[in-house]
Amino acid sequence: MRSPTRRKFLFGLGGTFLALPWLESVASAACARQAVAQRMAHFYVPIGVVRRGFFPGESKHVIPKGNLGNVMKSLGKQNPKLSVNPLEELTPTMEPLSEFKQKINLITGMDRTFQQGTDVHAQCASCYLSSAPPNAIKGSAWPLDRTLDHLVADQIGTKTPFPTLEFSCNSHRDNKESIYFDNISWYGTGHLAPSIRDPRKMYHRLFSTKEIERYRDITDLVLADASDLKKTLSRSDRHKFAEYFDSIRSIEKQMDRLETMRSELAQVTFDEPPEAYLPRGEYIRLMGDLMVVALQAGLTNVTTFMVGPERWDTPYKFEGLFDKPRSHHQMSHNQTKMIDDLLKVDRFHMEQYAYLLKRMDAIEEADGTTLLDNTLFTYGSGLGDGSTHQYNDLPIIVAGGGKRVPGGKHINLPEGTPLANLWLTQAKMLGVSLDRFADSTGTVDQLMV
Amino acid sequence: MGKSSVFAICLILLVGLFSFAQEDSSVSKNRSSQSGGSASAVTANESFDFDQRVAPILKQFCGKCHGQGDDLASDINLLELTTKNLDQHSELLQQVIDVLDLDEMPPSDEPQLDSAVRENLIKELRLMLHKQVERKKLFPRAPIRRMNRFQYNNAVVDLFQLKCIVFTLPERMMRDHNRYFRPETGKMPDVVTVGSRPLGKSQMIEPRLAGVAAFPQDLRAENGYDNQGDHLSMSPLLMESFLRLGQSITQSPDFHAKKVGIWQSFFRPPKDVSNLSQVVEDRLKPFLTKAFRRSPEPETVQRYVRYVMARLDSGEPFETAMKEVAAATLASPKFLYLYDISGSEDVSEPIDEFELASRLSFFLWGSVPDQELLLLAKSKQLTDPNVLSQQVDRMLKDRKLKRFCDSFPAQWLQLERIISSSPARDRFPKFYFSKYKTSMHMMLEPLLLFETVLIEDLPVTQLVDSEFTYRSVKLDKAYGELATGKLDGKKKGNDVQQLFFHRLPITDRRNGGVITNAAIMTMTSGPDRSKPITRGAWVAGVIFNNPPEPPPADVPSLEENPPEDEAQLTLRERLDAHRQRADCKGCHEKIDPLGFALENFDAIGNWRDEYANDRKVDMQGELFRKHEFNDVVEFKDAILNEKLRFTRGLAAHLLSFGLARALGPADQFALDEIVEQTAEDDYKMKTLIKQIVLSEPFLRR
């Protein structure tokens, strides 16, 4: 059967491909080895949201007029005090999540602090999961430290073939913007964990174990060179050069672990993605399916998913939404005229997130819970509203977490609560022993009651 | 040798004349050890004191914005500078010198420094900085970094002496179709046949190794060249690509005796197999030397020999075993990474001969050094200034220089930006032809100009105001009023695949040079209108190497089409009306005149005297608040009046590219020297490049 047809067929059944028989064997094998794995996934939405479409009680919120890129804070006044209310009727942008109301929590009132000197879009994405306070990183214009996904993977990603996987749905074909606009996952300052944009490449990374086996002999030889070389380097260069050792060792581990999973992986029925151009929605969902299958099959426990890059003015197609290619960023600075189109984009992104929740919730794990129950799956953006470039009051939704995270709440945190508080909370829930994360001032305990 | 000692003597003299009081024993210790006894001169004349002589001036003229309250302009606090902490603020000191020197600060609506005071202040600050730099002599270090994709391709081609490229590189913007690039002749032909990348993918497809897929294109570094270390890092994902790449190269069906230059000497099974391990060792030694750019340690060679022997022992054919060891070599960090051998982190020292060979070849050839450079390095002759100078001459005549021309000029001019420029179709219909854009012809013009200036060793001022240019028939026509009109009846070629570009004399000085050509004018415009601020920022950054800081946040941009109440304003008036924030002023006073100077060129580089609303274009201004200009030719004259500054800007770009790092305060004095030497030799391009190679930052770390 040709791949695209087969894939469509599987999708047509709405979730059934995730419940094919092999999965039970994977699941039971996993169960025999250990308890159900805890996972973390992040879904990043670029360029913020339109406030009045997203936040409860803001439907009459002022429409930003003209380009307000230098305002950098919310135009309206949010409730500055802590409140926890049940999620009632969902706002238009959140409406696609209605089916999962009891498995999600909306969190408002979280901020990041902008460090002067770099582009506001570049920083809001690249530093989103780092949240380092301004000027905390010496010699760098970026408050960018080892990001949450890697810190958590140091704890829960030590037995999977891939400690983390980075997905991106950047449709741009030009090379206009720098790495900072297109990446939320970093091993450390200046050390990028590059994402994969091409579903075929991701597919091969996940499922073709044959290719890399040839490298086993080579790695010994080149590691010896690396040790020689290291001796001749200065201290700072040695620090950076650790990336080479880390990379080689990761590949070795990856080979070993894939080897032990070989028979299980052989049963995965996920067809090779087509080479043909995919309309934007299909493209995002295909990448999403790959992410879900990677989490499900135990290939990794930690993923990040960028639904699009920051800024990048070049227009591209949003099939089904607009007739012509559009630039999300340019629209964001013209809400007066384009608010309806922007709301469509926000809702479109939310639909993709909802799609992934549905997929994950349809997968039953060995103990009767679902994949979603065992995953902290966070929707968020580095800007509260793209038009004003506000770093405050970011739109955040935390889904999943099972019994430990009772859903259905709107948690409005006191004004100025650092986003790092949520990252600290998640890190702790996943077993990382940390007292503080970046500029955190505490944990978001309301999430767990 | 001679140069640096003259430099040192000058320094001592200067320090002697203008020494500043500073109770810092390390100063005198260092200096006396270097120059033998001038320490007394330092302590004898303690007339200078920052706190007493500079700080009050800074407080009076700068303190209002850069020193009070929470709202520091550009986050710069000049009032915290004192004699004691000055040492930690070399960068800031350099910034202060630059803005004073270019007359950018104080802003024009603030009290101004008397020009004598200003000159004196600059002089004193420079000396102070010079002293700091001389004491520390710390050049910023380029961090260890992997090769970028372009360098990897070139290095593999050179290592195996491939007769084709490894993979297609969209980074290269121009293809040479008729082997016009012959630097050994010192002359560019009058007609060249070239292709441009975006005119169809097939344009750049050359004979290459089948079955080899490149690793992903390196994304741009922030404000820098694509060879800079900060973004060239490694990850498991990338490492996997490198491992795969090495295998796919040596196993490509095209990797055979006819295409691989070193086939006979490396891969072909030997006739005499009596002492195989000796044969393998003899073959590996030169191979590893070239791949690692230095003589490999005996243990390293033995390790690679054992690798091959193990394969042979297990029954693999000789050729296969050698292919495997070649693939492994390509994954070694000694091949993949560029780095300086450590040494003291506290003082500068000369780099070793092999490092110099690598710096040179990656600078001018984008690749590993050749045999001659490596031999000179081995025999420790390369650091001899005469030998070095001869080698630069040789390298500048080698066709591998094309790689420099394929990477530096396009990045210096930021030409990448033209590819996504899309002028509005309804306003500029002639910009489009069949499914293509004229910009694809435009972008070749400045590249060919740069290549000619280099190959023919012309003065770098030709880059600002050239006596000739290269255009296709289509491009010349696209210039409208500015067309040279000299191409009628000449061989036209086609407009898409192989473009004939003809050398044309420039008689109308509105034409010529890299600034006013259609490519730059188009890429610094929006779809509907020219963008003078964007143009100004381009001129400041590219021509004078003085790019504006990024705006505090994304500053609102003008609506493309003026609202009704602004319809009768000129662009300058509209921008003035929109720019209300005081803290924008400093920067805009610097960049705006540079951009408005080019307002006679519309969004596709065509000449206009009036805007669409019939208002006359107002482009008059002053360069550095010094040289008035009333038309674009006078603007070019103003830049030529400041040709030392232009040359310094270009030198800084080249040095930064050559060293794969951003420049620091210690580099500034080397730039002075480079520019001085270049000016003495009529600003010749090759002299500039040679002076870069002979400069301290290039030879030291």
Image: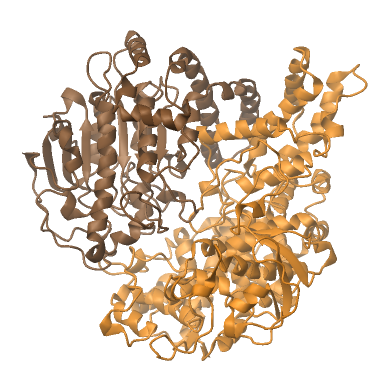
Res. B76 visible in picture: no
In the depicted structure, whether residue B575 falls above or below residue A242: below
In percent of the image, x 30 and y 41: which residue is there? A438
In percent of the image, x 22 and y 52: which residue is there? A392
In the depicted structure, whether residue A396 falls above or below residue B667: above
Q: How many marks?
A: 0
Residue situated in front as seen by the camera: B451 or A54 = A54
Residue B651, horizontal then vertical, whole percent: 63, 67
The chain painted orange is: B
Residue situated in front as seen by the camera: B154 or B423 = B423
- Report the quarter where the C terminus of chain A lies: top left
Residue B520 location, quadrant = bottom right
Q: How is the image coloured?
A: by chain
Residue situated in front as seen by the camera: B494 or B398 = B494
Residue B149, horizontal then vertical, whole percent: 61, 45
Left or right? Give the position of B561 relative to B6: left
- In the picture as drawn, the residue positioned furthest to the top comes out as A32
Left or right? Give the position of B72 relative to A228: left
What is chain A's hue in the picture? brown
Residue B502 location, quadrant = bottom right
Residue B695, horizontal then vertical, whole percent: 69, 61
In the depicted structure, whether residue A231 falls above or below residue A157: below
Residue B167 location, quadrant = top right
Res. A71 visible in picture: yes
